């Protein structure tokens, strides 16, 4: 009788162990950094996003539920079809469990459509269109660093209220730019201003002369730059060459990164108002983490996408640990259940639509004389909570959100 009982117990133990092993697919948790390694966003993301993901894995301990964590990467070349092909291959044949970064709104939307039917995790830190948590939302997608609603609200409202009440937009002709202009226009008008014109340009334009001349001819008080990356740097430099600011029109960059400020120099960017969700020099915790990252990355100043990639991977791994599995739906549920906590997010909620409800900050770029060391570029004008920053759920088109 004792032998039989012992045999049953051993069999049960073996069954439990077998189930536990099966909870991690392929005996490894594999994270794919789908990013721009060769195009206009590469200087912001690329190898720096890979480093941020790997740093999160290392800080977590390199294993989860006793299984190793692997980081792989690929270049989507800013093309939605390539992003879709790569993510399909990763999910279907190469055992990737989660994808992060996905810089560029068009490629993020394409990748989300591959991840959705497969119940795979998408950790979007490098794309800003609100469609990702709006009508295109997915139960297994979370959006981290920013979105066009929050940044347009912070900058457009403030500049308009300070007297910049007529706007002309230069807009990148893809999902990100369209979303940014739409949201900014809403907040300009809500704040008592008006939009008197706009022009769209193809991504990667080398010459903004004709677009800037149209903006200049409009006599708008503010030229809104609904763009990012290399396009933004080119437009700012050429606007300076044309004397647009010197002649009385203001430039308002709706999405700009600290690396852009460094790239054009404080003499060009000084006085610019912007919104961000992360500043490396904000407090002791951000400085300590940033110092470690800069040591790993050869001195690169981490931007909001870098920080968001790290935060998303760390939170994902915590959710895998808590869920006891890397199965997408179970992990996604845990990601929404557990508050986000890291070096700059403190008890931050992940909403049902996938929006990570972190704070945002209104900043003003310092003058060269005000800056005391490299990276000392911003003055904080205002701090906004997640609820003040992001689109209310009552206005959401996400089908996962129940309307009251």
Image (cartoon, helix red, strand yellow):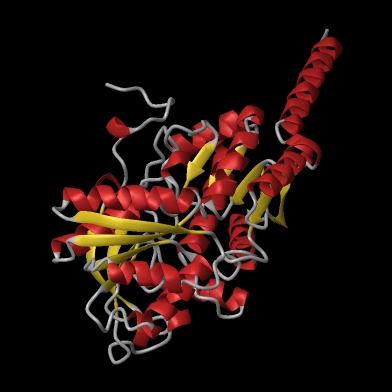
* Residue 73 coordinates in the image, percent (x, y): 71, 56
* Residue 208 coordinates in the image, percent (x, y): 46, 71
Give the total of numbered labels. Answer: 0
Q: Is residue 357 above or below residue 308?
A: above
Residue 25 visible to the viewer:
yes
* Residue 74 coordinates in the image, percent (x, y): 72, 56
The residue sitting at 41% across, 45% down in the picture is: 356
- Which quadrant of the figure has residue 350? top left
Name the one closer to the observer, 28 or 239: 239
In this view, the residue farthest toward the top is: 1
In this view, the residue farthest toward the bottom is: 369
The residue sitting at 18% across, 48% down in the picture is: 190
Image quarter (top left, top right, bottom left or bottom right) of the C terminus: top left
The residue sitting at 54% across, 54% down in the picture is: 104
Name the one closer to the observer, 286 or 80: 80
Q: Is residue 296 above or below residue 176?
A: below
* Residue 137 coordinates in the image, percent (x, y): 48, 34
């Amino acid at each position: 009788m004792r032998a039989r009982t012992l045999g049953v117990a051993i069999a049960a133990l073996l069954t439990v162990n077998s189930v536990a092993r099966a909870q991690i697919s392929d005996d490894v948790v594999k994270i794919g950094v789908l990013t721009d390694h060769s195009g206009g966003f590469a200087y912001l993301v690329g190898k720096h996003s890979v480093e941020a993901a790997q740093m999160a894995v290392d800080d977590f301990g390199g294993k989860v539920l006793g299984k190793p964590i692997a980081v792989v990467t690929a270049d989507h070349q800013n093309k939605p079809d390539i992003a879709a092909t790569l993510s399909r291959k990763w999910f279907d044949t190469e055992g990737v469990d989660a994808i992060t970064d996905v810089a560029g709104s068009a490629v993020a939307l394409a990748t989300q459509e591959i991840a959705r039917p497969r119940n795979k995790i998408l950790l979007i830190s490098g794309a800003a269109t609100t469609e990702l948590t709006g009508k295109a939302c997915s139960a297994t997608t979370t959006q981290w660093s920013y979105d066009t609603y929050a940044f347009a609200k912070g900058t457009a409202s403030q500049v308009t209220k300070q007297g910049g009440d007529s706007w002309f937009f230069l807009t990148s002709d893809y999902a990100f730019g369209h979303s940014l202009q739409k949201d900014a226009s809403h907040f300009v008008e809500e704040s008592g201003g008006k939009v008197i014109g706009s022009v769209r340009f193809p991504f990667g334009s080398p010459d903004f002369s004709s677009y800037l001349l149209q903006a200049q001819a409009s006599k708008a008080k503010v030229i809104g730059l609904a763009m990012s990356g290399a396009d933004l740097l080119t437009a700012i430099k050429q606007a300076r060459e044309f004397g647009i600011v010197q002649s009385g029109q203001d430039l308002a960059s709706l999405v700009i990164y600290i690396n852009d400020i460094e790239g054009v120099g404080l003499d060009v960017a000084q006085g610019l108002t912007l919104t961000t969700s992360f500043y490396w020099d904000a407090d002791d915790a951000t400085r300590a983490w940033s110092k470690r990252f800069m040591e790993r990355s050869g001195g690169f100043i981490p931007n909001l996408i870098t920080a968001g990639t790290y935060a998303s991977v760390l939170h994902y791994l915590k959710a895998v640990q808590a869920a006891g599995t890397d199965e997408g739906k179970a992990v996604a549920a845990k990601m929404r259940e557990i508050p986000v906590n890291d070096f700059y997010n403190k008890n931050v909620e992940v909403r049902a639509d996938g929006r990570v409800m972190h704070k945002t900050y209104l900043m003003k770029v310092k003058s060269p004389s005000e800056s005391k060391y490299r990276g000392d570029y911003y003055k904080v004008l205002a701090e906004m909570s997640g609820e003040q920053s992001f689109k209310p759920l009552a206005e959401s088109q996400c089908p996962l959100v129940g309307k009251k």
